């Protein structure tokens, strides 16, 4: 299985600032995704991180708010911009493994916005 | 649009009891993928199983078993002889494209000693 790491593991940020979350995978994967889990809620897909091209966003999420980079097949970043308390969530990186048979999630980044 | 419904919000059992978590996946697509994940108190999401819509064969892995019935769009998960370590939130998820999953609201399972 893929080993996924995220940095930071948690952070407390002030309203109006931005935070960049890093996701590193120990092997090359074709597909990487970013999900959000709001407090006490389920997971929601934010976007697909495409290597070498712009990310594909789901309904309700926009690039200006959640810019994503994916410079290679093992690394991606998600930025949460101009944060407000409503952005307080766990942000998870996810990868599809072995031809789509398994999908793994990173440990998550727990973000609190004051 | 897809929808995942987990009927039970919370389940409480005593150790060694069997417990079944229900999941119904609604989609107009004929080909789709279903998953179960475990989220223990530590917060990480643990992959348990993936099932394709064209494979209705039930699966057993140790104390875990899964029953998929395409006719009712149900993908139920049974833990046999539950243990305290099974206490967690369990998510059912489905999707028609690799990686793009719709999650249910989760079932909080508490196993008491």
Image: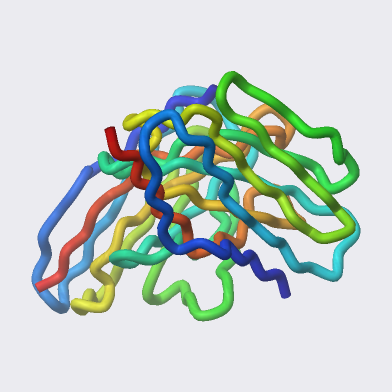
Relative to residue B81, is residue B23 depicted above or below? below
Which image quarter: residue A40?
bottom left
Direction from residue A64 to residue B37 in the image, left or right: right
Residue A102: x percent and y percent? 64, 34
Residue A18: x percent and y percent? 21, 67
Direction from residue A13 to residue B82 in the image, left or right: right
Direction from residue B5 to residue A107 in the image, left or right: left
Q: Nearer the viewer, residue B15 or A105?
A: B15
Residue located 83% across and 50% down the image: B69
Residue located 47% across and 58% down the image: B106
Relative to residue A64, is residue B4 depicted above or below? above
Residue A64: x percent and y percent? 40, 76
> Dividing the image into 4 quarters, which one contains the N terminus of chain A?
top right
Residue located 38% across and 50% down the image: B12
> Dividing the image into 4 quarters, which one contains the C terminus of chain A?
bottom left
In the rendered view, how is the structure colored? rainbow
Direction from residue B51 to residue A102 in the image, left or right: left
């Amino acid at each position: 299985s893929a080993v996924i790491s995220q940095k930071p593991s948690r952070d407390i940020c002030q309203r109006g600032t931005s935070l960049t979350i890093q996701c590193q995978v120990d092997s090359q994967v074709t597909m990487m995704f970013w999900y959000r889990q709001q407090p006490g809620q389920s997971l929601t897909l934010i976007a697909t991180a495409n290597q070498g091209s712009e990310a594909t966003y789901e309904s309700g999420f926009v690039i200006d708010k959640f810019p994503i980079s994916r410079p290679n097949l093992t690394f991606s970043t998600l930025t949460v911009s101009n944060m407000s308390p409503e952005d307080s969530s766990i942000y998870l990186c996810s990868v599809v493994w072995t031809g789509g048979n398994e999908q793994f999630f990173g440990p998550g980044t727990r973000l609190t916005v004051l | 649009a897809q929808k995942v419904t987990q009927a039970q919000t919370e389940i409480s059992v005593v150790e060694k009891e069997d417990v079944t978590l229900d999941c119904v996946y609604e989609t107009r697509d004929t080909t789709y993928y279903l998953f179960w994940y475990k989220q223990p108190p530590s917060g990480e999401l643990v992959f348990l199983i993936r099932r394709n819509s064209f494979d209705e064969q039930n699966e057993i892995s140790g104390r875990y078993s899964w029953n998929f019935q395409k006719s009712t769009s149900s993908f139920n998960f049974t833990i046999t002889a539950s243990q305290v370590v099974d206490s967690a939130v369990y998510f059912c998820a489905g999707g028609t494209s690799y990686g793009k999953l719709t999650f249910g609201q989760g079932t909080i399972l508490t196993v008491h000693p």
